[in-house]
Amino acid sequence: MTIPLPLPRKFYDRSAVEVARDLIGQVLVRRLDGRRLMGRIVETEAYVGEDDPACHAARGMTPRNRVMYGPPGFSYVYFTYGMYFMLNVVCGKKGFPAAVLIRAAEPLAGLNAMMRKRKLRDSKRLSNGPGKLCIAFDITTRLNDVDVTRRESPLIFCQGEKIATVAWSNRVGIREGTDRMWRCYVPGNPFVSPVRK
């Protein structure tokens, strides 16, 4: 499968909510040991600024969230709950902390490698959640602060297909800021993460 050019920096130089919508249908590409793991993004979530109580920047800049204050188009990968990595991409103007969490992707290439990493036989459960996605794509904090707009980067986002119908909901898996309808997903897609009622 041919890899198209990565999305340009101007794609990310916008509101995180806009980017969250427009990342739906785009392709996540992970280069790993001479192979390519690829997945179509089907679920995202926006985090916007220091006044967003669920955003990592809610208490200002720290060594952990420093990359969020940098230029758009860089990865922000962090470790949480002592067991999961989470992949985000930084959005908006430099100095304003905002990012989009990649919550789920539909595998397109490298399926066998992903299944080995996840120790699963059911492909629909491979990457239907942000922590699962990072395991399947071998994304850890080693890939924090990677320029995803450079063709040679080990992690990029490429032009995919336009998804005409998306849905919005409140964000999930957080304690504060759940009232903000900044989770975007493809309704009915089997690779979207399961949400507990």
Image (cartoon, rainbow, N blue to C red):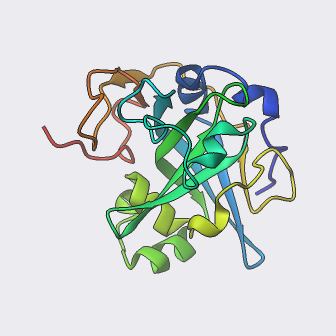
Across and down, in percent, residue 44 comes to: 47, 36
Across and down, in percent, residue 23 comes to: 60, 33
Left or right, 157 with reference to 124: right
Toward the viewer: 112 or 24?
A: 24
Toward the viewer: 139 or 116?
A: 139
Toward the viewer: 3 or 89?
A: 89
Q: How many marks?
A: 0
Left or right, 88 with reference to 33: left
Q: Is residue 16 above or below residue 194?
A: above
Residue located 36% across and 70% down the image: 83
- Residue farthest along the left direction in this orientation: 197
Q: Is residue 174 above or below residue 131?
A: above
Residue located 54% across and 36% down the image: 100
Toward the viewer: 102 or 88?
A: 88
Quadrant housing the N terminus? bottom right
Q: Is residue 193 above or below residue 109?
A: above
Across and down, in percent, residue 49 comes to: 51, 27
Left or right, 197 with reference to 53: left
Residue located 30% across and 28% down the image: 177
Report which quarter residue 54 is drawn in: top left
Quadrant housing the C terminus? top left
Residue located 32% across and 63% down the image: 81
Report which quarter residue 186 is drawn in: top left
